[in-house]
Amino acid sequence: MKTIIWDWNGTLLNDLDFCITTINKLLKIRDLALLDRKSYKAVFSFPVKNYYKNIGFDFEKEDFSIPAKEFIDLYDRGVKNCKLHRSADEVLFHFKELGFRQFVLSAMEQNMLEKTIKHNSVYDFFEGVFGLNDYYAVSKIERGAQLISKFNIEKEKTWMIGDTIHDFEVAKKLGIKCILIGDGHQSDERLKSTGAVVTSELIELKGSGLL
């Protein structure tokens, strides 16, 4: 059976501007240069510790856990105001009607992930939801392998759909196909450098023949 493993943040959940606003609060109190959409999408990466270093955080002055917790606390308080990407519901319903199995694999902490998906009323679309066990957003590869094993997913009939180079890397490690969406957390140029199929927005998946 055909299967989609969805990324959550930036792919289905439109939290780009909220993430920029939130990281800028941390940058401002440290007198570091602020980010706009273009600069953010040019530097955001996984693991997020490296991204924090690249935008000026000095982990000789403070441990990574300090800004990481500050970000998560602010994010957790405000993520309820983030909406799904336009047409996300429509696309999820489309693939449900076609008989696809659908899952979520996210770098978000497990409990926060489940809460956020339920808040956006799409939890029932997914056969399984896999986040990480902590807040440090390191890698989804191990969790993805657990997901595939637990649900006996047929790799040759499976696509990872995400919005970052890391999603492509995860798909490659897991031995599944990948499609990247360009209106999330990284620029089209960076996504296209992977050689993966890149679409501008979710609705292009519907009736595209890509899956």
Image: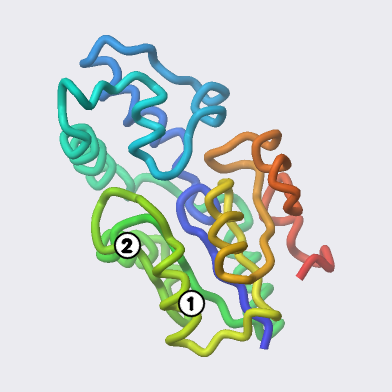
- The amino acid type found where label 1 is placed reads Phe
Which is more foreground, mark 1 or mark 2?
2
The spot of residue 9 in percent (x, y) is 46, 51
Residue at 43% over, 61% down: 140
Q: How many marks?
A: 2
| Residue type of the residue flagged with mark 2 | Leu
Residue 27 is drawn in which quadrant? top left
Query: 180 or 77, which lies in front?
Result: 180
Residue 57: where, in percent of width, then height?
Answer: 29, 23
* Front residue of this view, candidates 107 and 75: 107
* Residue 26 appears left or right of 46: left
Residue drawn at 43 percent across, 86 percent down: 150
The residue that appears at 25% across and 21% down in the rendered structure is 58
- Pointer 2 residue: 132
Q: Tag 2 or tag 1, which sits nearer the N-term?
A: 1
- Classify mark 2: residues with Cα within 10 Å, few (<14), some (14-19) or many (20+): many
User: Which quadrant of the figure has residue 2?
Assistant: bottom right
Check disc 1 and report its element: helix, strand or loop: loop
Per the rendering, the mark at residue 126 is 1
Residue 155 position within the rendered picture, expressed as x and y whole percent measured from the top left: 63, 80
Question: Would residue 97 appear left or right of 135 to someone viewing this image?
Answer: right
Q: Quadrant of the C terminus?
A: bottom right
For the point 32% across and 31% down, the residue is 22
Q: Is residue 191 above or below residue 62?
A: below
User: In the structure shown, which secondary structural element does the residue marked by tag 2 occupy?
Assistant: strand
Asked which quadrant contains residue 182, the reply is top right
Q: How is the image coloured?
A: rainbow
Tag shown at residue 116: none
Q: Is residue 75 above or below residue 39?
A: below
Q: Which quadrant is the N terminus positioned in?
A: bottom right
Q: Position of residue 3 (x, y in %)?
A: 62, 78
